[in-house]
Image (cartoon, helix red, strand yellow):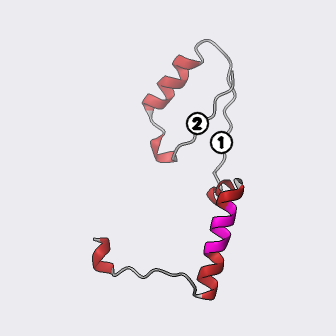
Amino acid sequence: MYTVYRLNADELNHQFLEALQTLFKDREIEITVSDVDETAYLLQAEPNRKRLLQAVQNINSGQNLVEVPLDMLQ
């Protein structure tokens, strides 16, 4: 069986460990930990790649920017 969990390190707790033990009961398992490069993940899909690269280009050229007053964010 192969299972991938993607979570924040802060979410690792006793309940997570118990869930692993239940799922893989009496089996030898291998645990590999790596941090996730969200930028690389988002750039994998071509539509996302085009949109994000266009957004960066817009920022660099000062075009198509939207200003939001800070009081609207509260």
Instruction: State the quadrant of the C terminus.
Output: bottom left
| Identity, as a three-letter code, of the amino acid under mark 2 | Tyr
Secondary structure under tag 2 reads: loop
Magenta span: 49-55
Secondary structure under tag 1 reads: loop
Q: Nearer the viewer, residue 55 or 20?
A: 55
Q: Position of residue 69 (x, y in %)?
A: 34, 82
Which residue is depicted at the point 57% across and 41% down? 6
**Circle 2 residues within 10 Å: few <14, some 14–19, many ≥20:** few
Q: Nearer the viewer, residue 10 or 62?
A: 62
Q: Position of residue 44 (x, y in %)?
A: 71, 54
The quadrant where residue 31 appears: top right
Tell me whether circle 2 and circle 1 mark residues in contact (CB < 8 Å): no
In reply to whether residue 7 is colored magenta, the answer given is: no
Residue receiving disc 2: 5
- Gap between marks 2 and 1 measured at Cα: 10 Å
Indicate whether 54 appears above or below 42.
below
Can the viewer see residue 43 in this picture? no
The quadrant where residue 20 appears: top right
**Circle 1 residues within 10 Å: few <14, some 14–19, many ≥20:** few
**53 on left or right of 6:** right
Instruction: State the quadrant of the N terminus.
Output: top right
Residue receiving disc 1: 33
Give the prevailing secondary structure in the magenta stretch: helix
Which residue is depicted at the point 64% across and 51% down? 35
Which residue is depicted at the point 58% across and 14% down? 25
